[in-house]
Amino acid sequence: MRTKRFRPDADVAPWKGGYSPYDIIKEGTIALVVVGLLTIVLAVVFGSPDEPSVTVKTWSNSTPVDFAMTALSELNQTSSSAQYGAPYNTKSIGQKLGPLELAKWVGARIPINTARDFVINPLTSLTDQPILTTDLQQWKTASSSTRAGWLANYTKASAHLTFVNGQVTVNATNAGPVPVFVNDLTSMARSGALDQALVTQAGFYTTDFTLPLLFMADGSYLSGLAQKQHLTGDQWGMMNETGNYPGQAWLWLYTFWYQIAPFNASSNADVLVWGLMMALSVVLLLVPFIPGLRSIPRKTRIYRVIWREHYQRTTTE
């Protein structure tokens, strides 16, 4: 004879035992007070330090040689931003998920030409600079091959670039207006004018800091600060506050994958980790519908531990 399958959600007999009073208002108030006090105390003890904002002015005054070299990489378009690919340009395929070229599908939605947007346009905003104005005109009328020659000559000599008495010094010949561009852009950055010029290219009133952030990320100054503040990827930076203070601990599962192979050595780590987290999220959502997996709590009888008072009472009665 076939027996009927036990259904724990429908076949359990109604509870006929006693009930204990529970004051939810009292318990909620106590919980609110305790959590509030803990939050205040922990914020005082472990609160994130109030670090000043990092700007192009800060960078160029702290390490002017690094800034000048980065400016050159933007002008000759060898920087990370210039070669990044989507959404800024089409210089590379970008992040892929297996055969799926996801970044390429997005396309260059935020088109950026580093030579134009990081160097030429900001310099054009400077007034009362007759030498710079002449050099800018020379650059604009020169052919692509002529510009490439100037940049190649300056780049070759830039291995010995120095910063002395407020001036960028490079012993470069046949470099056209490039020496003036790099020197004037460095002076512009050190005065703070470049920060404003980069932000206001999209309009005078804007909060779009894409350009200055990309510019700073192409140099070594910003990454050096991140290293000191324990914010790099191999330092679990996504879940840290500045100075290695406790941060968003709930991000540990996302950050964890960046620490192990093959993600920690892959150029597609971002999209691979994203894909894995999406798959894990789907599995979590489908737990109630996955045979075997959904039965783990019942088969392990973990519910008897959670509701141990109930089962102790029913056993003694």
Image (cartoon, rainbow, N blue to C red):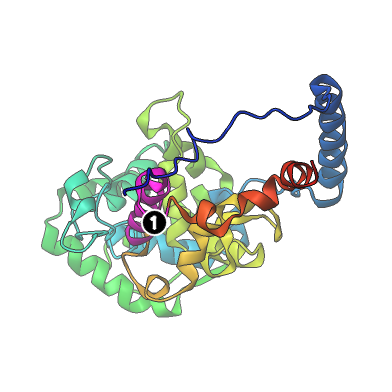
Q: Secondary structure at mark 1?
A: loop
The answer to whether any part of residue 123 appears in the image is yes
The answer to whether any part of residue 179 appears in the image is no
Residue that numbered label 1 is attached to: 292
* Residue 287: x %, y % from top left: 41, 48
Residue depicted at x 80% and y 26%: 28
Between 234 and 292, which is closer to the camera in this rendering?
292
Segment colored magenta = 271-293
Left or right placement of residue 232 versus residue 82 in this view: right
Where is residue 310, by image quadrant? top right
Left or right placement of residue 31 versus residue 280 in this view: right
Where is residue 98, by image quadrant? bottom left
Q: Name the residue furthest front.
A: 1
Total labels drawn:
1
Where is residue 93, by image quadrant? bottom left
Quadrant assignment for the C terminus: top right
* Crowding at mark 1 (Cα within 10 Å: few <14, some 14-19, many 20+): few
The reply to whether the magenta stretch includes residue 292 is yes
Between 97 and 168, which is closer to the camera in this rendering?
97
* Residue 97: x %, y % from top left: 24, 60
The reply to whether the magenta stretch includes residue 131 is no
Looking at the image, residue 261 lies above or below residue 306: below
Residue depicted at x 29% and y 58%: 84
Between 8 and 122, which is closer to the camera in this rendering?
8
Left or right placement of residue 186 versus residue 135 in this view: right
Type of amino acid under label 1: Gly
Residue depicted at x 32% and y 47%: 120
